[in-house]
Image (cartoon, grey):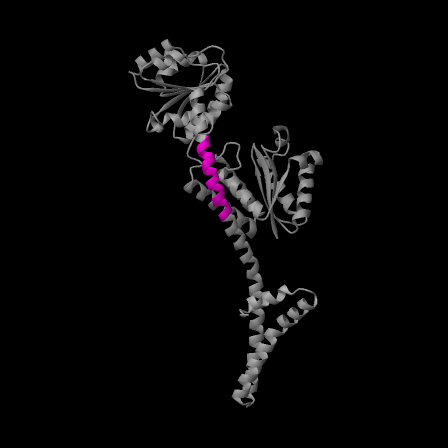
Amino acid sequence: MSLVAIGINHNTAPVAIREKVSFSPEAMSESLLAIQSLPGINEVVILSTCNRSELYCDVELPAEAVETLTQWLANRHSVDDKQLASCLYVQKDSDAVSHVSRVASGLDSMVLGEPQILGQLKSAYAVAREYETVGPMLNYLFQHSFKAAKKVRTETAIGENAVSVAYAAVSLSTRIFTDLKECRALLVGAGETIDLVARHLRDKGVHQITVANRTLARAEVLAEQFDAKACLLADIPDELPKADIVITSTASQLPLIGKGMVERALKLRKYKPVFMVDIAVPRDIESEVSRLRDVFLYTVDDLKDVIEGNRRSREKAAVQAHEIIGQLTEEFMKGINVRGAGSVIKSIRNQANEIKQAELARAERALAAGADPSQVIAQLAHNITNKLMHNPTVALRDAHENGQPDAGEWAQRLFDIKK
């Protein structure tokens, strides 16, 4: 049995290909069972996210399995064979083990060190277990990858610093407020960046969120996901006094929040501090707002400085993380090898035990018949020795006759014979 990881990701395939090769949650059970039924495939887990689609398999013959899986993927998603093959990467055995650990640790992600992928990988593993396409090998592999991810997170700084605009914006707010759970947030815009900001705010414990947008329908769609309030841009003057955190990201060509509007809001807030981040270009918040005493205003350029510094920090941590994964992969492969030897050792012991039992029974019959005990013991020892050594002796002689002199060295190691 061998391990194989095959797939595409943001580094090897454009979104036009990735969206074709993705697996919907509704079709996951069917796909898992279909792959497991392919010849030579014993176990399978499917990971499918916006940035990657990967199959992790325990297979009989890697080369044949890769060809089978590639053809299945092309047929399943109606993608041209050659086009798909040009985007696919294949990892086998120790490389596959290392790959899964890197994925789990966020080292293979578009945003280096991002934590969401570990949850997605755990979910993929859980679904495969539910449909019984996970056996001993993949169970061992995934438990190992989760252990590796935990060790990387614990012993390196790979996930400590913000490396996305949305996450950096939210992280900066902790410099102003020690407990975000008590804060109210006003998000201006309803695009992808604001979506990510809302997710990070929820992760930090912020539950009172208002989304303001040019069209109310779009604001409502986003707000519904986070149990938030939706309003129009025209409502910002009314919502601003309630907000401790204000993050904006729109396509407006003119500022939406001016100095006078913020001054009025501060007066109504009795000058409680306000944290504001303007991610938009052109800016949504007038630059003069930064002069107000109780406002902490950051622009996208401020965030870029934070992100760049943090990216360098993560890249340094990634070097250490790769070393950890390398060490753990070696341990994993040793464990696999020991497991492989275990079945052989068990068979050898069973065979030796059968010889022992048969010769003991023969000795007991001889004693019952009145034979000399000393002769019986000597014959017992002789018979056991001969039968235990017969097959190894024949195999060693055959090996030398067939030009395999290394067998002699192995025999000396097996029987601990000193030269």
Q: Quadrant of residue 35?
A: top right
In percent of width and height, residue 326 lies at 51, 46
Q: Residue furthest front?
A: 419
Is residue 262 depicted above or below 342 in this figure? above
The reply, left or right, for residue 174 in relation to residue 232 is left
Q: Quadrant of residue 168?
A: top left
In percent of width and height, residue 417 lies at 54, 70
Q: Is residue 7 visible?
A: yes
Q: Residue at x 66, y 72 (%)?
A: 394
Magenta span: 311-327
Would you say residue 312 sits in the magenta stretch? yes
Chief secondary structure of the magenta span? helix
In percent of width and height, residue 37 lies at 66, 47
Q: Residue at x 68, y 49 (%)?
A: 39
Between 158 and 340, the one lying in front of the other is 158
Q: Is residue 38 visible?
A: no
The reply, left or right, for residue 378 in relation to residue 273 is right
In percent of width and height, residue 64 lies at 69, 47
**How many numbered circles are shown?**
0
Q: Quadrant of the C terminus?
A: bottom right
Is residue 167 depicted above or below 123 in this figure? above
Q: Residue furthest top?
A: 260
Between 234 and 20, the one lying in front of the other is 20
Would you say residue 149 sits in the magenta stretch? no
Is residue 20 depicted above or below 2 in this figure? above
Q: Residue furthest left?
A: 270
